[in-house]
Image (cartoon, rainbow, N blue to C red):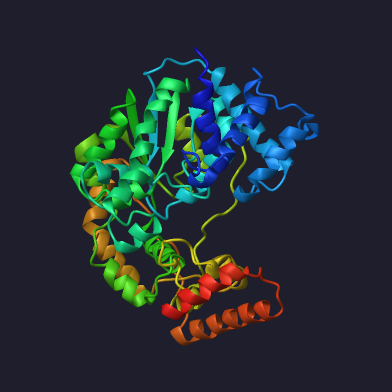
Amino acid sequence: MTAPSKKFEQQRFVSCVFGQPKWPKSMGTRRRTIQFILRTVLLGSDTGDVPENIGQNRQTHANTKLLGKYQIKCLTGFVARCRIFAAMIVSERKQPGVSGEMKAIVHIGCPKVGSSSIQLFLINNAVALAKQGIAYRQNFKNRGSQLEYPIGALTRMGKQLPRKDNQLRYQCRTFEEQKRKSLPYVERLKDFPAKWPDHVALFSTEHAAAWLTSEELVREFDAMFQEVFSEVQYVAYFRAPEDLIVSQYSEQIKTGNTPTFGQFFKRRMQGESIYRSMERWVNVVGAERLNVRLLDRNWLEGGDLISDFASVCGFDETGLERPPTVNASLTASGAECLRALNRTIPQLLPDGTRNPLRDNLINAVSRRSANAPKLALTKSQREAVRTHHGKDLNWFHQTFFPNQEELFKPKEAQEPLKPIKVREMALDVMTSLFVASRMETMPRLSKRQRKASSHRAKTS
């Protein structure tokens, strides 16, 4: 297998360090700085080892200091990134493989069914997985879902990303902007079989299940991968409808929305069932290319999501870093507190960037309400959920689990708190946040952040 060119590895290096596929526009002459470091630190070594005495090289040290703008705060941290990148390159060179004969496994969700845990696991173990012949590449730093691929399918079909808030959040305000944000990543799919001799390419984006709302869009999404890979399989996880709707409401509040649970519940009972959405995938790719799983400890391999995902994808999880609990649902009082804050502190600034005033806000609310009762459905709401999903859940059962007696066995119901009690507890959380702010135990914003935050809050 011919080693990848220096130019190609430089491009990958930029993606690893900066979390984006191209040199930052504001890089200017610093591009030569990165190229110098790449040559002296990494590409001169066939083993991928970074010289231990690199910190003693005055020129390297001086050039590395220029990277402070990109939050590479010290030479040690930068060398650590180089080591990770070097190990990834070397492990890939050692893997046997045949270019053009590569299988892809695409995890398509569903949303709020463990996707964040799977993605964090893949990000943390990308180098170790490469040694097992599994290729996973994070497209954007601080983002788990590779949503560029479903956006790419929308773009290839001439459609804009649905909903204005999504367009703002993902910097796809115009169709041209959407093309620039997605199509380069679709084009880079060709790099997997051409440059990386891994046996299996792995992708994860729960937005595929949420945004590809027609058979035409699913067909285009599948075509993107079929054009590159010799075999494409899809994996999707589902959970009980009662648990799903509570988790979906929590996510709505985390993303800055303000409906009450009653308002949200009413809208959901009028929308498409997530179980029936799999029908278009069956019609397009066929049930034989869909591996549908249940997020149920009694059903999962080893009673665990990560263990089950490893068995599906064919890698050994032994010794790999397990992710902590991520993106956990809010409690009843936490959701009510954050919902009230959302009315004054919007998630996004007018240019689509994150409002600095929300930095660490969700974590702060979650910590202060962690021991409160969870969000729960009333008895009538549970019955309404089962009625709404009944026909579609039966189709889902017969299509994917015909030999299983029952899906999602009913759990012992927990009655929700009275609304007035929830508001009282939310006020306690709000008071705790105020005290932390006054005692300056929460991180302070910079002058620039305060200006942007206060301006956005005033105009909301």
Image spot of residue 216 (x, y percent): 18, 43
Q: Position of residue 212 (x, y in %)?
A: 27, 48
x and y percentages locating residue 359 in the rendered image = 56, 65
In the rendering, at what x and y percent does residue 293 appear? 39, 43
Position of 230 with respect to 5 (left or right) is: left
* Image quarter in which the C terminus is found: bottom left
Q: Name the residue at 29% across, 51% down.
A: 211
Q: Nearer the viewer, residue 184 or 222?
A: 184
172 vs 404, nearest the viewer:
172
Q: Nearer the viewer, residue 269 or 339?
A: 339
Q: Residue placed farthest to the top in the image?
A: 1
- Image position of 45 with respect to 187: above or below: above
**Residue 258 visible in image:** yes
Q: Residue at x 66, y 19 (%)?
A: 45
Q: Is residue 287 left or right of residue 324?
A: left
Q: Nearer the viewer, residue 402 or 318?
A: 318
